[in-house]
Each structure stands twice: as structure tokens, then as C-alpha cells.
Image (spheres, helix red, strand yellow):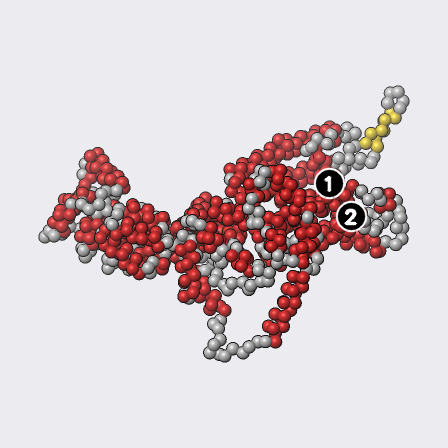
Amino acid sequence: MVGGKTASSTLHSRRVSCLASCWPGFGALRTQSGRSLEATEKTFLEAAERGDKHTIERCLLAPRSVNVNCTDLLGRSALQIAVDNENVELVEILLQQPDIKIGDALLHAITEGVLRIVELLIDHPSISASMLASGWSRSRPSTEESSDFSPDISPVILAAHCNQFEILQLFLARGAYIDKPHPLNCFCRQCEESKQSDSLRYSLKRIHTYKALASPAWLSLTSHDPILSAFKLSWELERLAELENEFKDIYMELSSQCKRYSCELLDQCRSSEEVIAVLNRRCSSSSPPEPALYDEAPHSERLSLDRLKLALKYDQKQFVAHPHCQQLLTSIWYEGFPIWRRRSGFSKVLLCLAIITAMPLLAATYLLFPRTRLGKLIRSPFMKFIYHSASFGCFLILLVLASTRTEGSEMYRQNTRGPAPSMIEWLILFWVSGMVWSECKQLWEEGLKAYVRQWWNWLDFIMLSLYLCTFSLRAVAYLQININKELPRSQWPNNDPTLIAEGVFAVANVFSFARIIYLFQTNPHLGPLQISLGCMIIDIAKFLFIFFLVLTSFACGLNQLYWYYDSNTEHCKQRPNGQMECQSNSDAFTTLDVTFATLFWSLFGISSPKSTELVDAHPFVEFVGQGLFMAYHVLSIIVLINMLIAMMSNSFQVIEDHADQEWKFARSKLWMSYFDEGCTLPPPFNVIISPKSVFYFFKGIKGLLVQLYSRPKVPHANMPRPATAEKGLLADGDTNSTGRQTSVESSVSRYGMSRASFLTLKLFLAAGTSNAASDTVQRNYATPRQQIHPQDEEAVQTGRRQRG
């Protein structure tokens, strides 16, 4: 017998022996039809189990040949038994029989991972190319349903599930394919019929298909850009997990599998150049950017990091936090300061203070001489971070000075409507103008969708909007108020622009100081705390929704109970000593807004329990009011507050379990905002018009004029192809240039294995190694069929024939 028994076949044998010893007549039964097995059929199946080639041939060559498709009690035919035992010779003999039925034998061969047997089975005349894909379920009779595999499991899907690279590559060469499921909200005829006939089978078919699409073997062999495909598929699976909550765990596991696959591809990089080649890869083969002035083009082109930006967009935390990515980002971040990380803490502080002190001089130098070596140093990400942080720190100092009124004009400004701006307020206006200009440039470069996707941009937008509203109100008050300009503040109208401006300015100051938390992401100790704080804010928002419902219900009940008892009416009675004692009801629940405030502050112990007492002798009303008030405290303080604490504790623990990954991902987002060219100088220096800006302005005007008045006429024969056609070709990878680029970049990223790695695989296969060793090499070096050299392909086929 060729090939040893596998664990599954041994288990089947033990089951058969056990049933035969405990159940007389077991060997004379069939499971599918209930018909008794003949003696010849029993001998035939036992010979298949033992791998007795000669007995099998005698049974098939007898005057009355045995039914080659007979099955035992477990529903296994002789062909399936031979496949389970990996007996290639016996499979060849059985496939020569004219009435042989392949059945589940092909699926079992794929599960076992025996390439030679799979080749024999798909070469049989009864197996067509369409049966390897969606035609597999349609080719089988409706009465024959497999007990081991779902009806929607086709051979190509099963090969992808089992991650069998060689078998899947063989199926792809035969024209097999996997159709991507339609969107969940698709209302086509096919989807509607599938949902109405069997909704569970429809969902399971989608899951099995996505499981095949998410397998490393399928991504490696079918995608020209496997990392990008893994990113998109992971993102799609997470969206499906939100829509189909019933199968959320399955979809999330598949999404995690795609994320691990992209990280495993990144593991194959062995040098910084290879990491740069992977992280710089674009989504499409677009033309390189136009060279810019001041020698910025080589740097920006070499370190565009388009793939890393895409990983941040698709929330690929494992990929971004990978050591290879972080090592490259760290080297770029400290460019120009290679010895920074080896400095002591005290020397770092002194160096930062020196850089901050020289900031005005360095800014003037960069404005005049941006091409110098010093200008290149100023453009480095770490220097830009220090300058922007120092600039924002100076802005906060100005806010503190404006709040403490250090200019000595308290009495003048206290009773003056629409006062003139002070020197500190002019500086604040100057700083805010620079920050607004910086945000406008960021919005222009990133686009609206990318801009609103970052929560810190929302904080900046709210903060700057409040400051602009403050300046506008102050300007209106200064220009329009000419009557009663000097008036005691107590006599000012409620809608005075100065009063509103002061309130808006106070709120803007709160947002400004809260923005300091954004800088915590660079610190390994404060960064995880900042991320946990963000998650806790989301928990608080969820809690407030439930708390508001509870608060509203009790507020409506207590207000309905107490609004009849007016707090302005005094009830007086005469004491025995002749003095009059006047009392009034509490105003804690007289109106709905007051009731809301009373219930809210009662959480902090501010309201009094006597708020429910009445001067009137209505004990039942007091009893109901006290009962509602106590129930509110029990439900709000004991239940809801502790639930909020538990939610926040759980969020903190989730972040703490992945603290390093979460912090590195958040830090990478911050670092990437300083990698791009532009916004070198911080506010307020960025509002100064530099010679470089003037040059770019006139260069843009010149390019626009040239484009308008110099349109060459292109002959019809030499006209380029339509943009849509080019885009389709580039997307499909049909052009030679795209094929070469894909091949080079795949070899660099270790997705397609290198020449030496492929020779190693070729030696393994040619030497006739075991299936386990072959599969191990294939899993470690997953190579697309398009990248294999013809000579190497011939050597692999020779090795397979020798092994078979």
C-alpha cells in the first residue's frame, strides 16, 4: 500500500471495528439505502481499507463485478477510503472504472492536502472546469447530500479554506473562480430568491465565501496587491459584522485573519529599503508627482508612505504597530537628530529650550533661505513638532495672561461696553489667524472626508470657531455701541455683545487647554491614558443616553405631583406665644426645568431631602413624592453610576491589554501629520508671506496661462486611450509596465518569494519530500503563478511527477 493511514482513516477503522464487534451483522448493512451488503462488496470495502490492491482488482475483474460505488455504514465508498488513506495507486485503479462516482472524494482529497490525488480526480471525465467552482452543487443530485460538507462548499472554496497553495493554484490554472457575494442590501432576483427559499443557507453561503476570500492562499495567488486586498476585505468584514450581528464573531475573526496576513507579509521584509518599498506603494500605477522646488521632490517621493496612510485609514492597528513600520517611522521622525534618543532627560530639556528660544531667528532664516542645510533641518518632522508645540504653549500663556488681567485695566474694562482690544488680545488674534490658516491648508491638502475623520480636527474646528465668534462679537460691540458706553455692568442688557463674547471666550479657553491632551500621544506613559480617556468619553455618552431617559421620567412625575403647590404663597399660622410663623412650599419641583436641575444636583448631594415636604397637610402626596425621590436615588446612584464605573473600567482594561499597540497606532497618526511637506512654520509665523510662496503663486499663474492658451492639437491616430480604459487596464494589471511594476514590488515585499527562496522550494519538491514538508514550504513562500519563471515551473512539475 502506498501512503500511510491518516488519523481520520484510523478513526474510521476503529469505529467500524467497534460496531462490528458490538452489533452482529454490521458488515451486511448499508447506510444510504439500507440494502444489505453482499459478501463481495464487504470484501471489496475491507480490501480498500487495508489497501489490498490485488483483492480490489480481483473483485473488479470477477464475472459479476462488484458495485464500485457501494458504501459502508459510515457512508464511505472505496474511492473515499483510498483518498483518506492517501493511497495513490488504489485511486488510479478505481478511477479506471467506467461507473465510478467521484462524490465527496475530491473534497476529502483537498482536506488531506494530497496534490497528486487531486490531480487524478479532476482529470476524470466526469469532472468539468465549472464543477470546481459554483457548478459543484448543481452537478450533484438533490437526493445526494453530503454529511461532511455543506452544499455551497465547492472544491476551490474548500482549497482556500484549507489554505492549500498548490491545490488552489492548480484549480486557478483550470479556470476555477470564486464569485464575491453581493452587498447585503442587494435586491437582485438571485439574492431575493435565495433569502426567501432558505435565509440560513443564504447567510452560511456568504460566510463560507468570505472565509475563502480571506484565506492567505487565495489572497496570495489571485491579488496583484495582496496587502491592499487584505486591508479592504478586513474593513468590509468589520462592516458586515456590524450589519449581521448574528454572525459577528465569525466576521470579526475573518477580519483579524486578514490583518494578521498583512503583518505576515510585512514580516518578510529584511531591510529598510524593502520596508520603504512596501509602505510607499500606491493604490494604482499613477504617474509620479511633479518635481517641486527646493529639492523637496526626492525626499517626498521616496517617503510618500501611501500604503501606511491607507493602513491608518482602514484602522489596521497591527500593521501600523508592526516593528518594521515603527522602526522606519522612528528613523524618519528623528531625521536630523540621530543622537536624540541616546541623550539624557536633562540634556533633552536643555536642547528643547534652546530650540524654542531660537524659534523667531530660525523662522526668519527659513523664510529667507529655505534651501540651506538649516532649512532642511527645520523641515524635519521632529523640529516641526517642537515648534508647533512651543507655539501652542505660548498661545496658552497668552490666554492665562488675558484671564488674569495683567495689563492693569480691570476697572476700565469692567464697566466699558465694547472695549478696545488690549495688546495681549491683539497677540491672541494674531495666533488664532495663524491657526485658522494652518487648518485651511490642512483641509485643502487632505480633503473634507479625511479631515472630518480625525476627531482632533473637530476639536480644533470648534475651538477656532469660538474664537472667531468672540472676535466678531467684540468687533460688533466696539463699532456699534456709541450710547451708554460707560455703564455699570449690572445695568447691561442681557444680549449685550460684550457679555456674549466673554462667555464664548471662556468656553473657547476650556477647549484650548483640553487640546494639550493631543500632545500626550508622543509619550509612552501618558499616551495609553489619553486613548483610554477617549474610550471613556464614548462610554459616558452611552451612559448619558440612558441616564437622560431615567432623569426625564422622574422629572415629569415629580413635576406633575408638585406643580400645584406654589412656592410663592406663604402659609402663616400663629404660635402659642402669639408670634406669626410663615412657611412656603419648596420650589424644587415647581417647574420642569427646575425639577431637572434638582434631580441632577441631587446626585452630588446638593439638594435636601426636605424638598418633598409640603406645608399643606397632604401626607399621601408627600409619601408618593418621597418614594419617587428615593427610587430615583437608588436607580441613579446605586445602579447607573456603578454601571458607568464598570463600563469605564472595562474600556480601560481593553486599552490596557493592547496598550502598546494602541499607543503606537495613535502616535503614528500624530507623526504622519508632520511627515508631509508644508506647514513647516507654526502660528503665527505661517501667516508671513515668504519668497517661496510668492514663487509658487506666480508659477501657478504661469502654468494656468500655459494650459489655457497652449493647447496642442493631437492627431486622431496618436490620441491617447480614454481615461476609463487606462484606469481599467491599470487596475487589472494587463499592461506590461504594470505587470513589471507588480512583479518587482511583490518580490521586494516578500509576498512573491525571491529567486533563492523559490529554488529552495524547487529542491524540496524535486527531491520527493513529504506532503507536510511541501505544504510547509508553500505556506512560508506563497508565490503567485504569474511570477514563476517557466523553467522553474517545469522543474516543479518534474518534481511532482517524481513524487507521484
Of marks 2 and 1, which one's residue comes earlier in the chain?
A: 2
Q: Which residue is drawn at 77% across and 28% down?
A: 617
Indicate the quadrant containing the N terminus: top left, top right, bottom left or bottom right.
top left
Q: Where is residue 778 in the image (x, y as percent from the top left)?
A: 33, 50
Q: Which residue is drawn at 59% across and 50% down?
A: 381
Task: Say whether residue 358 is left or right of residue 472.
Answer: left
Mark 1 Cα within 10 Å, few/some/many (few <14, many 20+)?
Answer: some
Compare residues 688 and 563 and report the one nearer the observer: 688
Q: Which residue is drawn at 85% across and 29% down?
A: 582
Please name the residue that numbered disc 2 is placed on.
424
When the figure is inspected, residue 557 is found, relative to residue 318, above or below; the finding is: above
Task: Say whether residue 771 is left or right of residue 89.
Answer: right
Q: Residue at x 72, y 38 (%)?
A: 597
Q: Which residue is situated farthest in the top direction here?
A: 577
Label 2 vs label 1, nearer the camera: 2
Please name the residue that numbered disc 1 is placed on.
592
Whether residue 314 is visible to the viewer of this picture, yes or no, is no
Label 1: element kind: helix
Q: Which amino acid does label 2 sit on?
A: Ile
When the figure is inspected, residue 198 is found, relative to residue 727, above or below; the finding is: above
Q: Position of residue 599 (x, y in %)?
A: 70, 35
Compare residues 33 and 686 and report the one nearer the observer: 686
Q: What residue type is labelled 1?
A: Leu
Mark 2 Cα within 10 Å, few/some/many (few <14, many 20+)?
Answer: some
Q: Where is residue 603 in the image (x, y as percent from the top left)?
A: 68, 33
